[in-house]
Image (cartoon, helix red, strand yellow):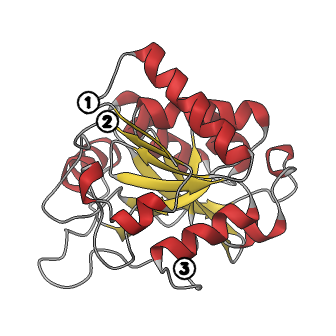
Amino acid sequence: MECIDRGHEPDADTVAADARTAFRSMRAGGVAVLPLSVSYAIFAHTARGVERIYELKQRAQTKPNGVIGNWDIFADVMVTTQRDRDLVRCITQEHDLPLSVIAPFRADHDWLRTVEYGGLRRSTKDGTMDLLLNAGRLHNELARMSWEAAAPLMGSSANVSLTGSKFELADVQESLRNGCDVVLGYGRSRYANDHAIGSTIIELPSWRVLRWGGCFEQQAAIILQRFGVALPARPADGRLSLV
């Protein structure tokens, strides 16, 4: 296991070098812990790598993974309306916030041509895909590499299931870290929160909130002002995620 704990987010050149290290490992079948702005995450590319994520997280077999994405992937691979695209552009580009969306996708797209069936099966559900956008510089660099190489990266939060998102590398369970091939640490996640939850997830085209993430209140205010749509408030009690 290669552990690179920088203690804080480094300069752009170092982030790019770290992204190359993680990407090479994941393409070769490895599993990587990644410091994203929404939480620490665990990702892979191959079917076996994805299965290792389930084993390390002790994750329920019925829960699909998310996929690293950017605007190019979203616009080209996901099946969305202009209204949906306006929403994603507003949140991720105009306001520079992270966002996950669940939407139908084009299963015959060239970007998916290298995906092994097992990896794709674990990262889609009923013809939809959960795409994470704009979750920090490392994430965005990996998304660019993923798009250019047609090598989707699939994964989840770096934690044993049902223990909450982790915002410090030291809080990621040792058993999970030790089971990975590359582990990167950039200090505390930018959007760390008391709810121990990662990104907001919105279903498209319904705009239904499926997870009330760390930036939800800010995102909801933007959506109300820009689109006149009032999203349901974060539940005071009970589950913050419906997926």
- Residue ID at (56%, 74%): 54
Q: Nearer the viewer, residue 106 or 206?
A: 106
- Can you identify the residue that label 1 sits on? 8
Q: Is residue 165 above or below residue 34?
A: below
Q: Earlier in the sequence, mark 2 or mark 3?
A: 3
Q: Earlier in the sequence, mark 1 or mark 3?
A: 1
Q: Secondary structure at mark 1?
A: loop
Mark in front: 1 vs 3: 1
Structural crowding at the residue carrying mark 2, measured as other residues with C-alpha within 10 Å and reported as few (<14), some (14–19) or many (≥20):
many
Query: x%, y% of residue 203?
Result: 49, 65
Give how far apart the Cα atoms at labels 2 and 3 are.
28 Å
- Can you identify the residue that label 3 sits on? 63
| Amino acid type assigned to the residue bearing label 1 in the image | His
| Amino acid type assigned to the residue bearing label 2 in the image | Tyr
Q: Are marks 1 and 2 in contact (CB under 8 Å)?
A: yes
Q: Nearer the viewer, residue 9 or 99?
A: 9
Give how far apart the Cα atoms at labels 1 and 3 are.
31 Å
Give how far apart the Cα atoms at labels 1 and 2 are.
4 Å
- Can you identify the residue that label 2 sits on? 186
Query: x%, y% of residue 140?
Result: 51, 33
Q: Nearer the viewer, residue 221 or 175?
A: 175
Q: Earlier in the sequence, mark 1 or mark 2?
A: 1
Q: Secondary structure at mark 3?
A: loop
Q: Is residue 23 above or below residue 207?
A: above
- Residue ID at (24%, 40%): 190
